[in-house]
Amino acid sequence: MSDPRITSSIFTRGAVDLSALRPSAPARSAAPTQGGPPAGVPGGATPGAGVAVIDVTEATFQSEVLERSLSTPVVVDFWAEWCEPCKQLSPVLEKLAAEGGGAWVLAKVDVEANPRLAQMFRVQGIPMVFAVVGGQPIDAFSGVVPEAQLRQWIQAVLKAGGVTVEPAGDPRLDEADDALMVGDLDAAEAAYRKILAETPADAAAEAGLAQVGLVRRVGGADPVAVFAAAEANHDDVEAQLLAADVEVLSGQAEAAYARLVALVRRTAGDDREKARQHLVSLFTVAGPDDPAVAKARRALASALF
Protein backbone atom coordinates (compact mmCIF):
# COMPACT_ATOMS: atom_id res chain seq x y z
CA MET A 1 0.00 0.00 0.00
CA SER A 2 1.20 3.51 -0.69
CA ASP A 3 0.59 6.70 1.20
CA PRO A 4 -2.46 8.45 -0.29
CA ARG A 5 -1.40 11.63 -2.01
CA ILE A 6 -2.93 13.71 -4.77
CA THR A 7 -0.45 12.69 -7.45
CA SER A 8 -0.51 11.62 -11.06
CA SER A 9 -1.94 8.21 -10.16
CA ILE A 10 -4.35 6.03 -12.09
CA PHE A 11 -7.13 7.76 -10.17
CA THR A 12 -6.22 11.38 -10.95
CA ARG A 13 -5.61 10.38 -14.57
CA GLY A 14 -9.25 9.42 -14.77
CA ALA A 15 -8.94 5.64 -14.89
CA VAL A 16 -11.93 5.36 -12.58
CA ASP A 17 -14.92 6.85 -14.41
CA LEU A 18 -17.60 7.89 -11.94
CA SER A 19 -19.51 10.16 -14.29
CA ALA A 20 -22.43 7.76 -14.47
CA LEU A 21 -22.89 8.12 -10.74
CA ARG A 22 -23.32 11.92 -10.91
CA PRO A 23 -26.94 12.45 -11.96
CA SER A 24 -28.08 15.95 -12.87
CA ALA A 25 -31.11 15.59 -10.61
CA PRO A 26 -30.84 16.99 -7.08
CA ALA A 27 -29.33 14.63 -4.50
CA ARG A 28 -31.85 12.66 -2.50
CA SER A 29 -32.83 13.94 0.90
CA ALA A 30 -31.12 12.49 3.94
CA ALA A 31 -34.33 12.80 5.96
CA PRO A 32 -35.46 9.54 7.56
CA THR A 33 -38.08 7.57 5.66
CA GLN A 34 -41.12 6.35 7.47
CA GLY A 35 -40.49 3.13 9.36
CA GLY A 36 -36.71 2.93 8.99
CA PRO A 37 -33.37 4.69 8.80
CA PRO A 38 -32.28 6.86 5.84
CA ALA A 39 -31.36 4.97 2.70
CA GLY A 40 -27.76 3.83 2.86
CA VAL A 41 -27.61 3.91 6.65
CA PRO A 42 -27.83 0.47 8.25
CA GLY A 43 -30.39 -0.14 10.92
CA GLY A 44 -29.12 1.05 14.29
CA ALA A 45 -26.69 3.61 12.80
CA THR A 46 -27.18 7.28 13.56
CA PRO A 47 -26.93 9.58 10.54
CA GLY A 48 -24.58 12.56 10.75
CA ALA A 49 -21.13 13.01 12.20
CA GLY A 50 -21.39 9.87 14.29
CA VAL A 51 -21.86 7.55 11.30
CA ALA A 52 -19.02 5.04 11.17
CA VAL A 53 -20.18 2.20 8.88
CA ILE A 54 -22.78 2.31 6.11
CA ASP A 55 -24.00 -0.16 3.51
CA VAL A 56 -23.95 1.44 0.07
CA THR A 57 -25.66 0.54 -3.21
CA GLU A 58 -25.40 2.04 -6.66
CA ALA A 59 -28.49 4.13 -5.88
CA THR A 60 -26.96 5.65 -2.75
CA PHE A 61 -23.31 5.86 -3.84
CA GLN A 62 -23.61 9.44 -5.09
CA SER A 63 -24.79 10.87 -1.78
CA GLU A 64 -23.26 8.44 0.72
CA VAL A 65 -19.78 8.28 -0.82
CA LEU A 66 -19.06 10.99 -3.39
CA GLU A 67 -20.92 13.86 -1.71
CA ARG A 68 -20.01 12.76 1.81
CA SER A 69 -16.32 12.60 0.83
CA LEU A 70 -16.35 16.33 0.11
CA SER A 71 -16.30 16.89 3.88
CA THR A 72 -15.37 13.49 5.37
CA PRO A 73 -12.94 10.89 3.97
CA VAL A 74 -14.73 7.72 2.93
CA VAL A 75 -13.15 4.25 2.77
CA VAL A 76 -15.02 1.94 0.39
CA ASP A 77 -14.82 -1.79 1.10
CA PHE A 78 -15.78 -4.03 -1.82
CA TRP A 79 -16.77 -7.44 -0.42
CA ALA A 80 -19.03 -10.46 -0.90
CA GLU A 81 -20.63 -12.97 1.43
CA TRP A 82 -18.70 -15.88 -0.11
CA CYS A 83 -15.31 -14.16 0.23
CA GLU A 84 -13.34 -15.65 3.13
CA PRO A 85 -10.56 -13.00 3.12
CA CYS A 86 -13.31 -10.35 3.30
CA LYS A 87 -14.43 -11.90 6.56
CA GLN A 88 -10.94 -11.25 7.95
CA LEU A 89 -10.54 -7.68 6.72
CA SER A 90 -14.04 -6.22 7.09
CA PRO A 91 -14.32 -6.65 10.90
CA VAL A 92 -10.99 -4.86 11.36
CA LEU A 93 -12.11 -2.00 9.12
CA GLU A 94 -15.38 -1.76 11.04
CA LYS A 95 -13.54 -1.67 14.37
CA LEU A 96 -11.21 1.10 13.18
CA ALA A 97 -14.14 3.07 11.77
CA ALA A 98 -15.91 2.88 15.14
CA GLU A 99 -12.72 4.02 16.87
CA GLY A 100 -12.56 6.97 14.45
CA GLY A 101 -15.76 8.42 15.89
CA GLY A 102 -16.92 9.92 12.59
CA ALA A 103 -13.53 11.26 11.44
CA TRP A 104 -13.95 8.93 8.45
CA VAL A 105 -16.69 6.65 7.17
CA LEU A 106 -16.52 3.04 6.04
CA ALA A 107 -18.82 2.38 3.07
CA LYS A 108 -19.42 -1.31 2.38
CA VAL A 109 -20.31 -2.40 -1.16
CA ASP A 110 -21.53 -5.94 -1.84
CA VAL A 111 -20.12 -6.70 -5.30
CA GLU A 112 -22.75 -9.40 -5.91
CA ALA A 113 -25.57 -6.89 -5.44
CA ASN A 114 -23.73 -4.00 -7.10
CA PRO A 115 -21.69 -5.37 -10.01
CA ARG A 116 -21.77 -2.05 -11.88
CA LEU A 117 -19.99 -0.28 -9.03
CA ALA A 118 -17.32 -2.97 -8.99
CA GLN A 119 -16.93 -2.59 -12.75
CA MET A 120 -16.56 1.20 -12.50
CA PHE A 121 -13.82 0.81 -9.91
CA ARG A 122 -12.18 -1.94 -11.96
CA VAL A 123 -12.36 -4.35 -9.04
CA GLN A 124 -10.70 -7.57 -10.18
CA GLY A 125 -10.46 -9.30 -6.83
CA ILE A 126 -11.85 -8.85 -3.34
CA PRO A 127 -11.49 -7.64 -0.74
CA MET A 128 -10.53 -4.37 -2.39
CA VAL A 129 -10.53 -1.08 -0.53
CA PHE A 130 -10.55 2.46 -1.94
CA ALA A 131 -10.04 5.80 -0.20
CA VAL A 132 -12.30 8.55 -1.55
CA VAL A 133 -11.51 12.18 -0.72
CA GLY A 134 -13.05 15.27 -2.33
CA GLY A 135 -15.26 13.16 -4.57
CA GLN A 136 -12.37 11.19 -6.09
CA PRO A 137 -10.59 7.91 -5.28
CA ILE A 138 -7.02 8.71 -4.17
CA ASP A 139 -5.58 5.33 -3.18
CA ALA A 140 -6.47 1.66 -2.92
CA PHE A 141 -5.24 -1.76 -1.86
CA SER A 142 -6.43 -5.32 -2.24
CA GLY A 143 -6.27 -8.36 -0.02
CA VAL A 144 -5.90 -8.69 3.74
CA VAL A 145 -3.29 -6.51 5.47
CA PRO A 146 -2.16 -6.41 9.13
CA GLU A 147 -4.09 -4.12 11.44
CA ALA A 148 -1.02 -2.01 12.21
CA GLN A 149 -0.42 -1.34 8.52
CA LEU A 150 -4.12 -0.62 8.04
CA ARG A 151 -4.02 1.97 10.83
CA GLN A 152 -1.10 3.73 9.11
CA TRP A 153 -2.91 3.73 5.80
CA ILE A 154 -6.05 5.25 7.33
CA GLN A 155 -3.98 7.93 9.06
CA ALA A 156 -2.51 8.82 5.66
CA VAL A 157 -6.02 8.95 4.16
CA LEU A 158 -7.13 11.32 6.92
CA LYS A 159 -4.08 13.51 6.33
CA ALA A 160 -4.85 13.63 2.61
CA GLY A 161 -8.41 14.67 3.52
CA GLY A 162 -7.19 17.47 5.78
CA VAL A 163 -8.43 15.73 8.91
CA THR A 164 -6.32 16.06 12.05
CA VAL A 165 -7.03 13.39 14.65
CA GLU A 166 -5.20 11.87 17.56
CA PRO A 167 -4.08 8.38 16.54
CA ALA A 168 -6.03 5.72 18.40
CA GLY A 169 -4.15 3.86 21.07
CA ASP A 170 -2.50 0.65 19.98
CA PRO A 171 -3.69 -2.24 22.17
CA ARG A 172 -0.47 -4.11 21.40
CA LEU A 173 1.54 -1.31 23.00
CA ASP A 174 -0.84 -1.17 25.95
CA GLU A 175 -0.23 -4.87 26.58
CA ALA A 176 3.55 -4.46 26.33
CA ASP A 177 3.56 -1.36 28.55
CA ASP A 178 1.42 -3.10 31.16
CA ALA A 179 3.88 -6.01 31.30
CA LEU A 180 6.76 -3.57 31.73
CA MET A 181 4.95 -1.69 34.50
CA VAL A 182 4.40 -4.84 36.54
CA GLY A 183 7.99 -5.95 36.04
CA ASP A 184 7.35 -8.88 33.67
CA LEU A 185 10.35 -8.04 31.51
CA ASP A 186 10.25 -11.25 29.46
CA ALA A 187 6.63 -10.68 28.46
CA ALA A 188 7.27 -7.00 27.75
CA GLU A 189 10.27 -7.78 25.56
CA ALA A 190 8.34 -10.42 23.63
CA ALA A 191 5.44 -8.02 23.08
CA TYR A 192 7.66 -5.16 21.89
CA ARG A 193 9.59 -7.48 19.55
CA LYS A 194 6.32 -8.76 18.11
CA ILE A 195 5.24 -5.19 17.34
CA LEU A 196 8.56 -4.45 15.65
CA ALA A 197 8.26 -7.62 13.58
CA GLU A 198 4.85 -6.43 12.35
CA THR A 199 5.70 -2.71 12.20
CA PRO A 200 9.44 -2.16 11.77
CA ALA A 201 10.83 1.11 13.17
CA ASP A 202 7.81 1.66 15.44
CA ALA A 203 9.28 4.38 17.68
CA ALA A 204 7.13 3.53 20.72
CA ALA A 205 8.04 -0.16 20.55
CA GLU A 206 11.72 0.67 20.08
CA ALA A 207 11.60 2.93 23.14
CA GLY A 208 9.83 0.23 25.16
CA LEU A 209 12.37 -2.41 24.18
CA ALA A 210 15.23 -0.06 25.09
CA GLN A 211 13.59 0.55 28.47
CA VAL A 212 13.39 -3.18 29.10
CA GLY A 213 17.14 -3.38 28.54
CA LEU A 214 17.70 -0.41 30.83
CA VAL A 215 15.71 -1.95 33.67
CA ARG A 216 17.53 -5.25 33.26
CA ARG A 217 20.94 -3.56 33.41
CA VAL A 218 20.15 -1.66 36.58
CA GLY A 219 18.53 -4.66 38.30
CA GLY A 220 18.76 -4.31 42.07
CA ALA A 221 21.71 -1.90 42.01
CA ASP A 222 22.13 0.46 44.97
CA PRO A 223 22.19 4.01 43.53
CA VAL A 224 24.43 5.31 46.32
CA ALA A 225 27.01 2.59 45.68
CA VAL A 226 26.75 3.05 41.90
CA PHE A 227 27.44 6.78 42.05
CA ALA A 228 30.24 6.31 44.57
CA ALA A 229 31.97 3.82 42.27
CA ALA A 230 31.60 6.14 39.29
CA GLU A 231 32.98 9.10 41.26
CA ALA A 232 35.92 7.06 42.54
CA ASN A 233 37.12 6.15 39.05
CA HIS A 234 36.10 8.36 36.13
CA ASP A 235 37.91 6.06 33.72
CA ASP A 236 35.97 2.95 34.74
CA VAL A 237 33.74 2.61 31.69
CA GLU A 238 31.35 0.03 33.20
CA ALA A 239 30.90 2.15 36.33
CA GLN A 240 30.08 5.23 34.24
CA LEU A 241 27.60 3.34 32.06
CA LEU A 242 25.76 1.95 35.07
CA ALA A 243 25.69 5.39 36.71
CA ALA A 244 24.14 6.83 33.53
CA ASP A 245 21.49 4.10 33.57
CA VAL A 246 20.58 4.88 37.16
CA GLU A 247 20.38 8.58 36.34
CA VAL A 248 17.94 7.95 33.49
CA LEU A 249 15.70 5.80 35.70
CA SER A 250 15.89 8.50 38.38
CA GLY A 251 14.62 11.16 35.99
CA GLN A 252 18.03 12.72 35.44
CA ALA A 253 18.41 11.93 31.76
CA GLU A 254 20.30 15.11 30.91
CA ALA A 255 22.90 14.34 33.57
CA ALA A 256 23.25 10.83 32.14
CA TYR A 257 23.75 12.19 28.63
CA ALA A 258 26.37 14.67 29.83
CA ARG A 259 28.18 11.91 31.74
CA LEU A 260 28.43 9.70 28.66
CA VAL A 261 29.36 12.53 26.28
CA ALA A 262 32.24 13.34 28.64
CA LEU A 263 33.18 9.65 28.67
CA VAL A 264 33.27 9.62 24.87
CA ARG A 265 35.57 12.65 24.92
CA ARG A 266 38.17 11.05 27.19
CA THR A 267 38.17 7.50 25.82
CA ALA A 268 39.29 5.91 22.58
CA GLY A 269 38.94 2.72 20.59
CA ASP A 270 36.55 0.05 21.88
CA ASP A 271 35.81 1.94 25.10
CA ARG A 272 34.77 5.02 23.17
CA GLU A 273 32.52 3.02 20.86
CA LYS A 274 30.95 1.23 23.82
CA ALA A 275 30.16 4.55 25.48
CA ARG A 276 28.71 5.93 22.24
CA GLN A 277 26.47 2.92 21.67
CA HIS A 278 25.26 3.02 25.25
CA LEU A 279 24.37 6.69 24.93
CA VAL A 280 22.44 6.03 21.73
CA SER A 281 20.48 3.28 23.51
CA LEU A 282 19.50 5.81 26.17
CA PHE A 283 18.36 8.21 23.43
CA THR A 284 16.04 5.46 22.20
CA VAL A 285 14.43 5.20 25.64
CA ALA A 286 13.45 8.87 25.49
CA GLY A 287 12.41 8.92 21.84
CA PRO A 288 13.59 11.10 18.94
CA ASP A 289 11.38 14.10 19.75
CA ASP A 290 12.82 14.76 23.21
CA PRO A 291 14.57 18.19 23.18
CA ALA A 292 17.21 16.90 25.60
CA VAL A 293 18.05 14.13 23.14
CA ALA A 294 18.49 16.61 20.30
CA LYS A 295 20.83 18.70 22.46
CA ALA A 296 22.81 15.64 23.56
CA ARG A 297 23.12 14.39 19.98
CA ARG A 298 24.76 17.67 19.02
CA ALA A 299 27.13 17.36 21.97
CA LEU A 300 27.94 13.77 20.98
CA ALA A 301 28.68 14.81 17.40
CA SER A 302 31.03 17.51 18.71
CA ALA A 303 32.78 14.97 20.96
CA LEU A 304 33.26 12.51 18.09
CA PHE A 305 34.39 14.95 15.45
Image: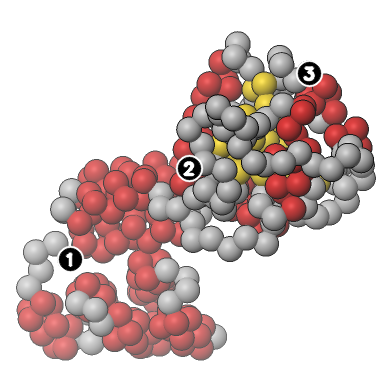
Q: Nearer the viewer, residue 96 or 255?
A: 96
Tell me the quarter of the picture where residue 239 sits: bottom left
Q: Is residue 286 above or below residue 87?
A: below
Instruction: Please state, as top left, top right, bottom left or bottom right, where the C terminus lies in the image.
Output: bottom right
Amino acid type of the residue that numbered disc 2 sits on in the rendered structure: Ala
Amino acid type of the residue that numbered disc 3 sits on in the rendered structure: Pro
Residue shown at 24%/43% (left/top)? 187
Q: Nearer the viewer, mark 1 or mark 2?
A: 2
Image check: 45 left or right of 3? left
Looking at the picture, how far across and down is residue 180, in whole percent? 23, 54
User: Is disc 2 placed on a helix, strand or loop?
Assistant: helix
Residue at the spot of label 1? 218
Spatial CA distance of label 1 from label 2 is 42 Å
Residue at the spot of label 2? 98
Mark sitting earlier along the chain (1/3): 3
Residue shown at 46%/86% (left/top)? 295
Mark sitting earlier along the chain (1/2): 2
Spatial CA distance of label 1 from label 3 is 63 Å
User: Is disc 3 placed on a helix, strand or loop?
Assistant: helix
Residue at the spot of label 3? 115
